[in-house]
């Protein structure tokens, strides 16, 4: 089972799906406007044209790809997400508040194995869940990660996280020599 989300126009997208996707964006943007304007009715004089333009621009600028999460991958990823969030938050808090814990900050190059696209962007954004790690830059197929302690097994943790993201999206990883490798 897949939770498909169309993130842009595609040539084979039905008119119903296009209307549904556009309507959902318009409603979300209208709710955002309502929040920004504190529910002020007079603000809709500017809000309606703003929401319409923002909806049109967001549809126009969206990538023309389809992606989806695998239900099984999501069920496996969700507990890991909670675990990494808690572990990362506690570890950074300990390192920041305990002067006995030495820091050894560094920049680590990590060869990305996810193909270009939504899954790679998602992975780069969730790297900050790992204890003392933060995505700093992407150089081609290499992710530069800032770490608080270069003695920790950061590359191993990144590989585990990247495999979990691949399973979440139901895609194969590319091996170090850029060939596909299955994660399931």
Image: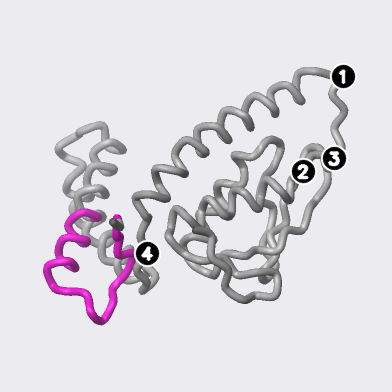
Q: Which residues are magenta?
A: 3-25
Task: Say if the magenta span includes residue 18.
Answer: yes
Marks 2 & 4, CB-CB < 8 Å contact: no
Q: Which numbered mark, 3 or 1, is in the foreground of this view?
A: 3
Of the 4 image quadrants, the one containing the N terminus is: bottom left
State the residue in front, 42 or 176: 176
Q: Residue at x 68, y 59 (%)?
A: 143
Q: Secondary structure at mark 3?
A: loop
Q: Which numbered disc, 3 or 4, marks the residue that appears first in the sequence?
A: 4
Marks 3 & 4, CB-CB < 8 Å contact: no
Q: Residue furthest left?
A: 16
Q: Which residue is mark 1?
A: 100
Q: Which residue is mark 4?
A: 67
Q: Which numbered disc, 4 or 1, marks the residue that appears first in the sequence?
A: 4
Q: Which numbered disc, 1 or 2, marks the residue that appears first in the sequence?
A: 1
Give the distance between the C-alpha atoms of the residues marked 3 and 4, in whole angstroms.
36 Å
Task: Say if the magenta span includes residue 49.
Answer: no
């Amino acid at each position: 089972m897949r939770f498909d989300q169309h993130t842009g126009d595609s040539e084979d997208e039905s008119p119903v799906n296009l209307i549904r996707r556009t309507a959902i964006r318009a409603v979300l943007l209208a709710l955002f406007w309502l929040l920004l304007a504190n529910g002020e009715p007079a603000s809709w004089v500017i809000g309606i044209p703003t929401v319409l333009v923002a909806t049109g621009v967001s549809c126009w600028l969206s990538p023309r790809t389809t992606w989806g999460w695998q239900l099984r991958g999501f069920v496996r990823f969700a507990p890991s997400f909670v675990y990494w969030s808690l572990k990362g938050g506690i570890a950074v808090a300990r390192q920041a508040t305990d002067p006995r814990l030495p820091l050894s900050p560094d920049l680590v190059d990590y060869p990305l194995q996810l193909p270009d696209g939504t899954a790679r962007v998602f992975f780069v954004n969730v790297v900050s869940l790992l204890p003392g790690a933060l995505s700093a830059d992407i150089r081609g197929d290499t992710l530069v990660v800032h770490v608080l302690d270069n003695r920790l097994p950061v590359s191993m943790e990144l590989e585990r996280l990247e495999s979990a993201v691949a399973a979440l999206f139901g895609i194969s990883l590319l091996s170090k020599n850029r060939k596909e490798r299955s994660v399931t």
